[in-house]
Amino acid sequence: MTGTMELRRRMETGGIALGCNVRFSRSPEVGALLAASGMQWIMLDFEHSPASPHLASDIALGALRAGVVPLARPSSHDPREIAGLLTNGALGLIVPHVDTPAQAVAVAAAARFAPRGVLSVPGSLPHFGYALSLAEACARFNEEVMVLAMIESAEALANAPAIAAVPGIDGLFIGASDLLWETGHPGDYGGPVLRDAMHRVARAARDAGKFSGMGGPREEVVWQEAIAAGIRFVMTENDLALLMRGARDRAAFFERCTLAASPR
Ligand code: 3PY
Ligand code: MG
């Protein structure tokens, strides 16, 4: 059983929290597989995945039991969608397109039970085993739940310090692809817009006593600069990209073997 405290501790002591966007995987074992591969969190992606809520719940519960933190990216800011994700296994949110402090206030409240928010109380919570009373489980959930606001527009970037300052927002998270496309620089992961954003978002989060993260880029040089700038919450790749990278490496290796073995 795991919670978010270890993730927070890693980042507070200068480490990075590594995760993966689970978009295509269909087995509840994916959390265990990624935990064994060095990941500490996964993101169930309702913005871009065709997965059903039931499957996502199974994957989230498998991740909890395997010691990797399940977060979810809802497709909207709708408190009803957020409630379905958080009360069925997800232990936090990576919320897309948070452009204003008012939106940040609303999603932070949607992710917590009273008195800290408006999340509706279910009959039981699955996150911490079932030995705690419901009141104890809800109080622990309020302590552990992690809410990251995605900064992926020019408006969000301008508002990053105010969004970071919202109580209940634990961190800022750059959606690099949307930010670049929205600002007219599609695919320019190594360019000045994203580099400037990384520094501004990391600073805004740090000044508010929060952490910062990012997803989207694949280039190692971009990540090196991001981590040097203070970004600590790293979405390494999505599962599809990891599968293709491994498959391509393997195909290239056997291609080389075949060439080496062919009769001269
Ligand atoms: C983006 O790059 O826009 C993202 O949402 C990363 O997941
Ligand atoms: Mg995005």
Image (cartoon, rainbow, N blue to C red):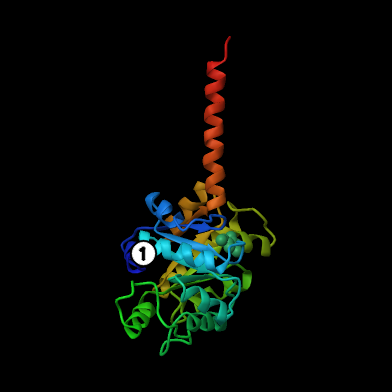
Looking at the image, which residue is at 60% across and 66% down?
47
Q: Quadrant of ligand 1?
A: bottom right
Is the shortest distance between ligand 1 and the CB of mark 1 under 8 Å? no
Left or right of 199 in this view: 181: right
Using the rendered image of the protein, determine whether residue 136 is visible from the camera's viewpoint: yes
Residue at 46% of width from left, 55% of height from top?
30
Viewer-nearest residue: 6 or 44 = 44
Q: In this view, which residue lies farthest toward the bottom?
A: 115
Q: Is residue 127 above or below residue 238?
A: below
Q: Nearer the viewer, residue 145 or 122?
A: 122
User: Viewed as shown, does residue 36 lie left or right of 76?
Assistant: left
The residue under the point 56% across, 31% down is: 252
Image position, residue 113 (x, y; %): 43, 85
The kind of residue tagged 1 is Leu
Looking at the image, residue 98 lies above or below residue 176: below
Residue 19 spot, x, y in % from top left: 45, 57
Which residue is rendered at x = 37% and y = 82% of the image? 138
Q: Up-down: is 110 above or below 151? A: below
The residue sitting at the top extreme is 264
Residue to which mark 1 is pinned: 7
**Image quadrant occupied by the C terminus:** top right
Name which quarter of the figure residue 73 lies in.
Answer: bottom right
Query: In what quadrant of the picture does the N terminus appear?
Result: bottom left
Q: In the current view of this chain or complex, which residue is farthest to the right?
A: 184
Residue 69 seen anywhere in this rendered image of the structure: no
Q: Residue 4's x, y, as percent? A: 36, 68
Q: Identify whether 76 is placed above or below 186.
A: below
Q: Residues within 10 Å of mark 1 (few under 14, many from 20)?
A: many
Query: How many numbered marks does the figure carry?
Result: 1
Instruction: Return the x and y of residue 66 as percentages of the image width and height.
Output: 37, 59
Dot 1 falls on a residue whose secondary structure is: helix
